[in-house]
Image (tube, rainbow, N blue to C red):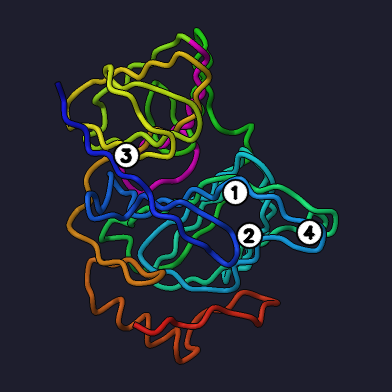
């Protein structure tokens, strides 16, 4: 029997939004390019309130926001201003310096809203860690979907399960939303060296071993495995090629060279950073 690496996430709070964070963890620092994984738990915001992640910086990574319910407004220092609906992909590559905000759009804030989704960070390859940033928005209808025998797969980013997403990933990547009806199975191929499964809702088994809801399970390399469910189940499968070397993470900064992180910390603290047009509030550098 294969021994699986099971990660139980820690509960956190991001500007008032409750989350579960299984990556990074002591058991696993990365899966493919994924170095950070936040599950934004289902939350109801009363009228007059909403999520509001103020202006903050990034380097050396791409952020990917994907919602199951609700909407968020993305603004960044490139001048992007985009409302991201459930099922869309919001993709931002930081390069050497970018700042952004994410908040509940004003019309939803006025009347009250729900929010549920995922935000992940993908470490950039070393040759993309510096340089200009980039933002792209991919509507839900642009993402490829396979729906067969009670198993629906939506390819959020990368390639896998004979699908390819339009999101401009920087290295071999797999990121798929999977919805399985009762008494169905799904073979997870070994086409990507590093893979993991995160169970959002429902009960599933992986080669006969039960998976806990809100657990992240790292699959062994080079081994095909079969997911099976007896009731409705909602999960994501993600991974890709291993990183081209170790990464340091400090606050919102990711880099292969610790000197890049120290420089970024000093620049943000000094106010020497690109700013989001029309935004004055920001999250200050935390004390070490």
Q: CA distance from mark 2 to mark 1?
A: 10 Å
Q: Using a 10 Å C-alpha cutoff, classify the residue at mark 1 as few (fewer than 14 neighbours), some (14 to 19) or many (20 or more).
A: some
Camera-near label (4 vs 3) is 4
Q: CA distance from mark 2 to mark 3?
A: 25 Å
Q: In the figure, 92 relative to 138: above or below?
A: below
Answer with mark 2 or mark 3, whichever residue precedes in sequence: 2
Q: Is residue 30 left or right of residue 3?
A: right
Answer with mark 1 or mark 4, whichever residue precedes in sequence: 4
Q: CA distance from mark 4 to mark 3?
A: 34 Å
Q: Which residues are magenta?
A: 165-182
Residue under label 1: 137
Residue under label 4: 109
Tell me where residue 48 sits by quadrant.
bottom right
Q: Tell me whether circle 2 and circle 1 mark residues in contact (CB < 8 Å).
A: yes
Q: In the figure, 141 relative to 96: above or below?
A: above
**Residue shown at the point (46%, 56%) measured from the top left:** 63
Camera-near label (1 vs 4) is 4
In depth, the one of 66 and 243 nearer the eye is: 66
Q: CA distance from mark 3 to mark 1?
A: 21 Å
Name the quadrant of the C terminus: bottom left
- As drawn, the label of residue 74 is 2
Q: CA distance from mark 1 to mark 4?
A: 22 Å
**Magenta stretch containing residue 170, yes or no?**
yes
Camera-near label (4 vs 2) is 4
């Amino acid at each position: 029997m294969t021994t699986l690496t099971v990660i139980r996430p820690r509960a956190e709070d991001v500007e008032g939004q409750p989350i579960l964070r299984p990556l990074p963890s002591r058991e696993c620092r990365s899966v493919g390019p994924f170095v950070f994984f936040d599950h934004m738990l289902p939350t109801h915001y009363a009228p007059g309130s909403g999520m509001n992640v103020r202006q903050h910086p990034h380097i050396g990574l791409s952020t990917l926001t994907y919602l199951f319910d609700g909407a968020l407004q993305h603004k960044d220092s490139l001048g992007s201003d985009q409302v991201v609906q459930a099922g869309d992909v919001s993709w931002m590559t930081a390069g050497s310096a970018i700042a952004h905000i994410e908040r509940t759009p004003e019309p939803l804030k006025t009347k009250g809203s729900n929010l549920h989704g995922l935000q992940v960070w993908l470490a950039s390859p070393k040759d993309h860690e510096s340089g200009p940033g980039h933002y792209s928005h991919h509507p839900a209808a642009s993402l490829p979907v396979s729906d067969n025998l009670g198993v629906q797969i939506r390819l959020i980013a990368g390639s896998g399960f004979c699908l390819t997403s339009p999101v401009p990933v920087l290295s071999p990547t797999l990121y798929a939303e999977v919805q399985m009806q009762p008494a169905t199975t799904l073979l997870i191929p070994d086409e990507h060296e590093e893979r993991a499964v995160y169970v959002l809702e429902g009960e599933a088994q992986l080669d006969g071993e039960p998976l806990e809801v809100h657990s992240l399970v790292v699959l062994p390399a080079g081994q095909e495995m079969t997911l099976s469910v007896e009731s409705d189940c909602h999960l994501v499968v993600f991974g890709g090629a291993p990183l081209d070397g170790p990464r340091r993470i400090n606050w919102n900064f990711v880099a292969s060279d610790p000197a890049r992180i120290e420089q970024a910390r000093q620049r943000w603290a000094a106010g020497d950073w690109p700013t989001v047009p029309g935004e004055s509030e920001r999250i200050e550098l935390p004390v070490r």
